[in-house]
Image (cartoon, rainbow, N blue to C red):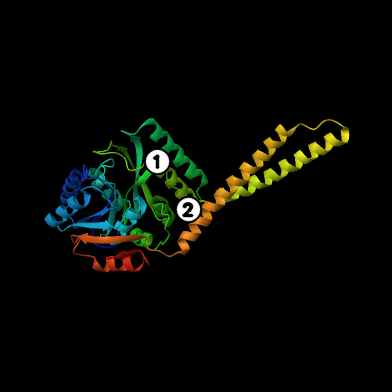
Amino acid sequence: MITEPLSLSVVSPCFSEEQVLPEFLRRTRAVCDSLDLPYEIVIVDDGSGDRTWSIISEAAAADPRILGMRLRRNHGHQLALSAGIAATKGAMVLLIDSDLQDPPELLPAMIERLCVEGADVVYGQRRRRAGDSLFKRATAAAFYRLIDLLSDVPIPRDTGDFRLISREVADLLCRMPERHRFVRGMIAWVGGRQVPFPYDRCPRGAGSTKYPLRRMVRFAVDAITGFSRRPLQAATLFGIAAVFFSIALALYSLLGWVSGVAVPGWTSLMSAVGFLSALQFLMLGMLGEYLGRLYEESQGRPLFLEAGRVGSGLAIGERTRVRSERELPHAAIRD
């Protein structure tokens, strides 16, 4: 809920988006100008290898309300998004990707819903996903339903990171130090009044997706292990089931020996051994995911490394910005 004078921060992480970034900045600035309120656009270059940083620097030189942040290397979408949130100063913060699949022109309607309904979060909920392949739509639908089934926190289905959040929610996010971040899940965990905003997702403005299958799988694993203990509970249940299966197999073998009936040969035995071995490796893999997260969190490394900034962003709200940075311990190291 907004409790201070209206001002807006737009946060957009980007990775090698030189083809679409100029159009994104043009459309976003046009929408923000029409709102007649103080605003800033925070663009985070997540270690791009093309002209993305040059475009950001030129835009910031022409308009100081554009704040460019350059990370020293590619940290991934969720950490780049977190870096941008930590730098914001506005009373409202819009999270949006720069590929134009989420239209910035929806911002005025989202602000109206945030203010009129007294919400803390207005999250974009996709009705249709234009431009995505059948495989991408099917796997996305399966992922959202799987995380909804497994998560200890209710996470809305068919939602991405496209959402408008209040300053309070942004500050709470900055206080969460975990490294394997699933931002939409973290926002759901914060609670408060969160309302949906249905919309139709557009095709990419230009370029190609930066989320290949490998990153999608890693993202899904981070989401599940970060917001659910059920894989560990499933490991226990599978272990109990495997014990009963082994007992039944032993009784079957003993009954065959007592009755003088030939016990099935090595094929059935090896099948049982293979099944139990595969089950053990599966459970060890699940445990390894959780232990790996604990190991990386215990190292205490900064969430992201910042190489530099251009522009100044909002000229108001310095108190809010300083509080956010203080509440994010070891968040960034700047040159």
Q: Residue at x 34, y 50 (%)?
A: 77
How far is the residue under mark 1 from the one under mark 2? 18 Å
> Residue at point 29% right, 38% down?
208
Q: Is residue 249 left or right of residue 157?
A: right
Q: Secondary structure at mark 1?
A: loop
Q: Is residue 230 visible to us here?
A: no
Instruction: Estimate the x, y position of residue 323 in percent, counting from the top left.
Output: 31, 68
Residue type, numbered disc 1: Asp
Looking at the rendered image, the quarter that the N terminus falls into is bottom left
**Does residue 52 appear to the left or right of 189 in the view shown?**
left
Extreme residue toward the right, this view: 259
Corner quadrant of residue 273:
top right
Where the C terminus falls, by quadrant? Answer: bottom left
Residue designated by label 1: 158
Q: Is residue 163 positioned above or below 205 on the image?
A: below
- Counting other residues with Cα less than 10 Å from the Cα at mark 2, is it few (<14), some (14-19), or many (20 or more)? many
